[in-house]
Image (cartoon, grey):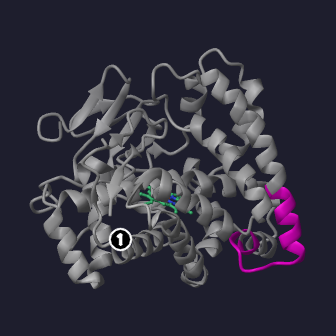
Amino acid sequence: MRSEDPVHYCESGGYWILTRYRDVEVALRDERLSSDKKPLHINQLGSLDVKEIQNFLALTSKMISEKDPPEHTRMRKLANPGFTTRAIESWRSIIQNTTDRLLDRVQNHGGMDVVSDLSLPLPGFIIPEIMGVPETDRANLLEWAMDITLIFGTSGGSNIDIEELARKADKAAVKFSALIRQLVEQRRRQPGTDMISLLSVAYQEQGVNFEELPSVCIQILIAGLLTTTDMIANGVNALLSHPDQLQKLKKNPSLIDSAVEEMIRFDTSTPFFLRIAKQDLTIGGKEIAAGSVIALGFGAANHDPEKFEEPEVFDITRTPNEHLGFSSGIHFCLGAALARMELTICFTTLLRRLPNLSFDPDQQAIPTKHSMLLLKGFDSLPVKF
Ligand code: HEM
C-alpha cells in the first residue's frame, strides 16, 4: 500500500490511511487535522441515545489526546508536572519491584504466558501505584478504567455489542470520577510524591478547577496500560524471532536503550492513530473532504525504506532511529519517558533472570485480532525458560 497507494481510501472502513513516513510526519503538524474524535465516538454508538452516556462523554471528551490547541496546550502544560524526569526517576523502584514480583511467581515453572503473567499485570500494578491510588481501590480502578477503555476507540470486532459496552462504560465513568475526586481532595490537603498529588498541586498553583482531573487520570490509564502491555509482548516476540539480536543484547546489556527503540520501531503497539479533517484538504494528490477520518499509519511509516535503511531488518544497534511509535509534534506521547523506563527495566530483568528464554514449541502464540483501540499485540504469547 505504501508504494502503490500511499494515501489510500479504505472503502469498507470509510476512512483514509497514510502509510508514508513523510506524509504521516507532515500530518502530525497539520493544524487542519483535529484530534477531537467525539463525532466518531458518537457515530459508532449506533442508535444509542447520547443522553445515556453523558457521564462517559463528559469524562473522555476532556482528555488531552482529544484536544486541539489552544485547549490542548493549556491541558498539556498542566499535566507535565506529573511526568518530570525527577518524578519518573522516583518511581524506578516501583517498576523494578513489580517486575521482580511477577517473575518470582513464575521463576520455577519453566514457562509462562508473557501476556497474562507479565505484560498485562505489569502496567496494571505500576500505574495505579505511581498515581498513589490506595491498594484497596486499585482493582476497582482498573476494572472501571477497562470498562471505559473498551468503548474508547473506533469500532473493532464486528460482533461486539457496542451499546451494551457504552452503558457499562457510563456507569464506570461515574464511579471512576468519584474515586479520583476523593483522592484529589485528600492530596490537596496532604500532598505526597505520587502523580495525583503532583497534578493536584499543579492545578492548585495555577488556580484551575479540579473538575478536569478525573479526565486527566482516565487519559493516563487509557494511554498507559494496554500500549505498554502490547509493546512488551511485541518486544519479546521480536527478540525471540531474531536469536542473533537476542544473543547480542544478552552479551551486551548496555544496548538495552537502543534495543527498546528498535522494538518500538519494528513492531509498535500503536500502528495507527486517528485524526479528523477540519476542512477540505489535499494530501499526496488526493482530495480529502472536511469531516473525513484519517488514520496515520505509524507502523507503516516506521518501515518506510525512504526513511529507514533496511527497514525489515531488526537491528538493536540501529542509529539514528527516529521512529513514530510515540508519535511526534504536539501530541508526542506524554508518558514516553515512563514507558521507556518500564520497558528497559522489564527487558533487562527478564533476560537476567530467565536467560534461557525461548518460544514454547508446544503452544501457539495468539496475536490480537480485533482491537477496539487500534492497538497491535498478543492475546497470548507462551514461552519457556
Ligand atoms: C510503549 C508504550 C506506549 C506507546 C507505544 C505510546 C504511544 C503513544 C502515541 C503514539 C501517542 C500519540 C497519539 C497522537 O498522536 O494522537 C501517545 C499519546 C499519549 N500517551 Fe502514550 N504510549 C505509551 C505509553 C504511555 C504511558 C505509560 C503513558 C502514561 C502513563 C502514556 C500517556 C500518553 C498520553 C497522556 C498521551 C496524550 C498526549 C497528547 O495528546 O498530548 N503513554 N502515546
- Taking the image as drawn, is residue 23 in sight? no
Q: Amino acid at mark 1?
A: Leu
Image x and y of residue 52, in percent: 76, 25
Question: Which residue is label 1 attached to?
Answer: 354
Of residues 139 and 6, the one nearer the viewer is 139
> Where on the picture, by quarter, is residue 213?
bottom right
48 to the left or right of 206? left
In the image, what residue occupies the spot 31% across and 77% down?
256
Q: Is residue 191 magenta?
A: yes
- Check the image and report above or below for 359 versus 247: above
121 to the left or right of 258? right
The magenta stretch spans which residues? 180-198
Image x and y of residue 32, in percent: 43, 44
Task: Check the picture and name the quadrant holding the N terminus.
Answer: top left
101 to the left or right of 321? right
Q: Is residue 4 magenta?
A: no
> Where on the picture, by quarter, is residue 266?
bottom left
Of residues 67 and 191, the one nearer the viewer is 191
- Taking the image as drawn, is residue 372 in sight? yes
In the image, what residue occupies the spot 60% across and 42% down?
149
Q: Residue furthest left?
A: 310
Dominant SS of magenta comes to helix
Q: Residue furthest top?
A: 47
